[in-house]
Amino acid sequence: MFSPSLVRLLALAVTLSSSLQLASAAVYEAEDGAFSGTSVGSTFTGFTGTGYVESFDNADDKVTITIAADKTGLYDLNIRYSAPYGAKYTRLALDGAPAGDVPFDQTAENVWKDAPAGQVLLTAGTHTVSLTTNWGWYLVDSLTVTESAPRPPHSVQDTLVNANASAAAKGLHTYLLSQYGSHMLSGQQDIQYITWIEQNVGKTVAIAGLDLIDYSPSRAERGTVGVSVEEAIAFDQRNGIVTFAWHWNAPSGLIDVAGKEWWRGFYTDSVTFDISAALADETNADYLLLIRDIDAIAVQLKRLQAANIPVLWRPLHEAEGGWFWWGAKGPEPCKKLYRILYDRLTNHHKINNLIWIWNSVKADWYPGSDVVDIVSYDSYPSVGDHGPLSTQFNQLTALTGDTKLITASEVGSIPDPELVVAYGLRWSWFVTWGGEFITDGLWNDLAYLKRVFSHPFVVNLDNLPANWKSGGRDIPASTSTSVVPTATTTTTGRTTLTTVTSTKKSTSTSKSTSKSTSKSTTTTKKATTTTTTAKTTARTTSTSTAKTTAKTTTTRRA
């Protein structure tokens, strides 16, 4: 267990050692570890050492590898693996504490790859790293531990991709950039959960997360009535910042049967809509419906523009997961749709109050720096895992050459601000998802929430300068400004210092559990015929409860 004073010493040691020559990589053969349900194999070729670890079959099967750190500091972990049976995940633990999930891309037989497993802050001495099945049927050859290189200054420029961006949009970006690395803004999805935080934590978030879901024409024609624009205007009047996603109900092809109801129409498994076919030419009916939908959303965004409200705009989110129809056919159709969306809203509709956010860490999904202002990651690690998300931050840094702001656009467990500081990360803001993620006391318990929202690194609503729309960067005098964007001032109440590498939501849920959970969810959340009930059911199920189940079920095929 690390005490606050020890963490300060750890962080200081990291800072002092950053100027020293880095140690060479240490390679630990997996077959030299301790096994629980796993075994050593040698049937496949190309491994190093005397074999590899296999038999990650059951939920608790694991290998535990003992590593050594010559001195206290940050270290990079890399796992050499083979995944000939498809893309997989392994669950990482450091010294017995959860440290997130590591994705393994599919490989051919007898082909081995390195998977980055994030950074860890280690004291001098020995530690254990465990790899547990998660989504099994993979092979582990070795673990490499390398002292982390110092993080250079960022090179983010204060420009937006839309040359005609509104003064308020420019001002917001300027303000966010002024806080980048020295503060992290707090955010919460849905007004009802912002109210919950106010009532239970005594703080108001700086950023309200909202959704244009109910303005989708295929929902509106079934009785939903969107209210998020009114909510955004009200929050703006409180001097708050707003970010919008769009759970875009497919324009056509809603299956609308039990378990695949119309209000699940943004999920791949609930529609027959084919984005590739729709984008094949500009005359087919589905393409024209896409344009119709974009135009409908433009009406709402223009209302916000008229109210002088800049929007952190995150369309086509989580595309790489494939659980949403816009990502179901791979990166190329999705990138094409994103660029169509950008062109239609920016050039046709002249909507200039948007700051465009892309939501993927993978290079082959990136639509291009000419249409992206901010890059982001949605994090849903194991319950209660508050790691700093160093792997994903580093991936996003590499994605743009560190030229764009980086944000944790959705989180289940909030990254510990102490660890964000200690690891030298620059998450611009976080937005916690609603429902169980904020209220159940497991993903983020109340004591932890109070610590997060009281932390001097975290900016809440009462910390926002009144002139942030014009780039104002001053923190009100009532707020502590003792935080420095280095690891030298950090303290923590955490019992472990670990990293998180989850890239899918609800990865802690097993295939069988997610299947049964999804079934129970869809059984109890049946569509209703009245407008009010349908709207409430659709919004709650589609973007809260179902969020933790359908994605897992959709993507975790053995």
Image (cartoon, helix red, strand yellow):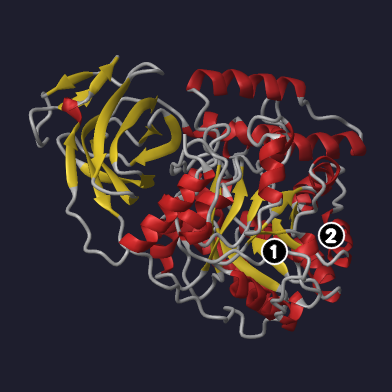
* 535 shown above or below 133: below
Q: Residue visible at 88% across and 59% down?
A: 230
At label 2, which amino acid type do we have? Val
Q: Quadrant of residue 523?
A: top right
Q: Residue visible at 81% across and 74% down?
A: 466
Out of 332 and 392, give the one closest to the viewer.
Answer: 392
Report helix, strand or loop for mark 1: loop
Q: What residue would you read off at disc 1?
A: 480
Left or right for 16, reference 65: right
Left or right for 376, reference 207: left
In space, the residues marked 1 and 2 are separated at their CA atoms by: 33 Å
**Total of numbered circles in the picture?**
2
Left or right for 443, reference 188: left
The C terminus, quarter of image: top left
Report helix, strand or loop for mark 2: helix
* 410 shown above or below 465: above
Q: Residue 336: percent from the left, percent from the top?
A: 51, 63
Residue 534 can be seen in this image? yes
Q: Residues within 10 Å of mark 1 (few under 14, many from 20)?
A: some
Sequence-wise first label, 1 or 2:
2
Residue 361 can be seen in this image? no
* 249 shown above or below 299: above
Left or right for 239, reference 282: right
Q: Residues within 10 Å of mark 2 (few under 14, many from 20)?
A: some
Out of 34 and 55, give the one closest to the viewer.
Answer: 34
Q: What residue would you read off at disc 2?
A: 229
Q: Residue 152: percent from the left, percent from the top?
A: 38, 70
Out of 505 and 522, give the one closest to the viewer.
Answer: 505
At label 1, which amino acid type do we have? Ser
* 467 shown above or below 60: below
Q: Residue 477: percent from the left, percent from the top?
A: 77, 71
